[in-house]
Amino acid sequence: MKVLIAIDSFKGSISSIDGSKAISLGIEDVYHDAEIVTFPLADGGEGTVEALVQATDGLLINKKVTGPLNEKVDAVYGVLGDGKTAVIEVAAACGLPLVASNKRNPSVTTTYGVGELIYDAIEKGYHDFVIGLGGSATNDAGVGMLQALGFSFLDQHNEEVGLGGKELQRIREIDVTQAHPKLKDCTFKMACDVKNILYGPTGATFVFGPQKGATVEMIKELDKGLENFAQVVLNELDTDIHNLIGAGAAGGLGAAFAGFLQAHLHSGVQLILDLIRMEEKIQGVDFVITGEGKLDGQTSMGKTPLGVAKLAHNHQIPVIALAGGIAEEPSTLNQLGITSCFSILNAPMSIEQAMDSKVTFDNLRLTTNQLFRLIQAVHINKSLLQLK
């Protein structure tokens, strides 16, 4: 019996690494000699660095950088096993969890720390980058990041603008002459499934601003800032950053990466699967187990379980999906390549109980145990019938 486990984290509850351990134990409880291959996954958001570093036998680098509220925070980025590719989650430097709920204000939060992480990696000799876009507390269109990399954004008095989304309306000129000279040798791949343009009703501010603490009035002003910035970039650099697919990701960081660093947008989960060479690792597998905290409409639109299921389906391998809850119509998920899906909740409980990491660990192990008892029984009965 060979099983490949490739799950995302159950966000707010258990990491993909610990979840994989629980599932492995559930299989080993039944198949003591099972060959189990685990690839903790992510889709470009939380857990991307950890998943890729583990899967490629890479390393983690700690760096103190400027946090979203312009204070120092401890951040981590990774280097893949190839020894040349740096992996950065923008949330490590400007993520929403770094800002207390009563201090969330995208008018002042900055992406400066993201630029510091990139700068540090360049100075250490890494020129290829994978950037996980997601979970930012910012709405500054990546201007802070670019400032940390040496770009200058000047106001009408020819002075450098400050940090935060509110500063974008003041930008009148752009000076690229002092940008880090090695940027021209770097390649950037963005792992992101957000398709939003930069500004307007479907842009960064209107869609994602409220969850970052933006009030109705603040949203209008921040959106004007994004529009002004896009217009200045168009005038000064002859580059349209507004209409780029994914420009609105991470408060406009997508626009900064694509417009200034020539980054290319990739489906988060597909990029991760390619980097860990999942196509090779799936050969000879009897079952694939995937999952995340909740199987819902977003799952069917390209989240981690679906990416894994599509790959397994191409190789005609059965796929079991485990989740805390299943909001999507199961038949829809079945049509998209998931053979069967199961909730790991086995008794009525509060959300707080269900999100407890130990409860989730135990439920993942128990559910997997019961599923593989069934699989074992079917195999035994099939073998007995063949003997007759």
Image: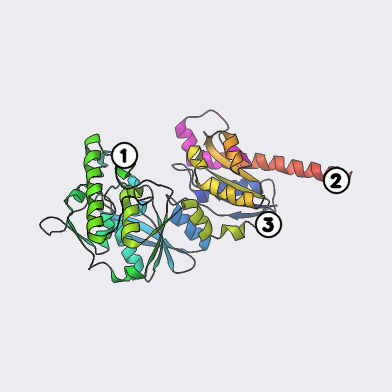
Tag 1 residue: 201
Q: Residues within 10 Å of mark 2 (few under 14, many from 20)?
A: few
**Residue at (39%, 52%) from the top-left corner?**
133
Q: Is residue 366 visible?
A: no
**Residue at (54%, 49%) from the top-left corner?**
307
How many numbered discs?
3
Tag 2 residue: 386
- Asked whether 355 falls inside the magenta stretch, the response is yes
Q: Which sits earlier in the primary sequence, circle 3 or circle 2?
A: 3
What amino acid is found at the position of numbered circle 1 in the picture? Pro
Q: Residue furthest left?
A: 157
What amino acid is found at the position of numbered circle 3 in the picture? Gly
Q: Which mark is residue 284?
A: 3
What amino acid is found at the position of numbered circle 2 in the picture? Gln
Q: Residues within 10 Å of mark 3 (few under 14, many from 20)?
A: few
Q: Is residue 12 visible?
A: yes
Q: Which sits earlier in the primary sequence, circle 1 or circle 3?
A: 1
> Quadrant of the rendered structure where residue 130 is?
bottom left
| The residue stretch that appears in magenta | 340-362
User: Which quadrant is home to the C terminus?
Assistant: top right
Q: Position of residue 139 (x, y in %)?
A: 28, 47
SS at mark 2 in the image: helix
Q: Is residue 97 left or right of residue 159?
A: right
- Asked whether 160 falls inside the magenta stretch, the response is no
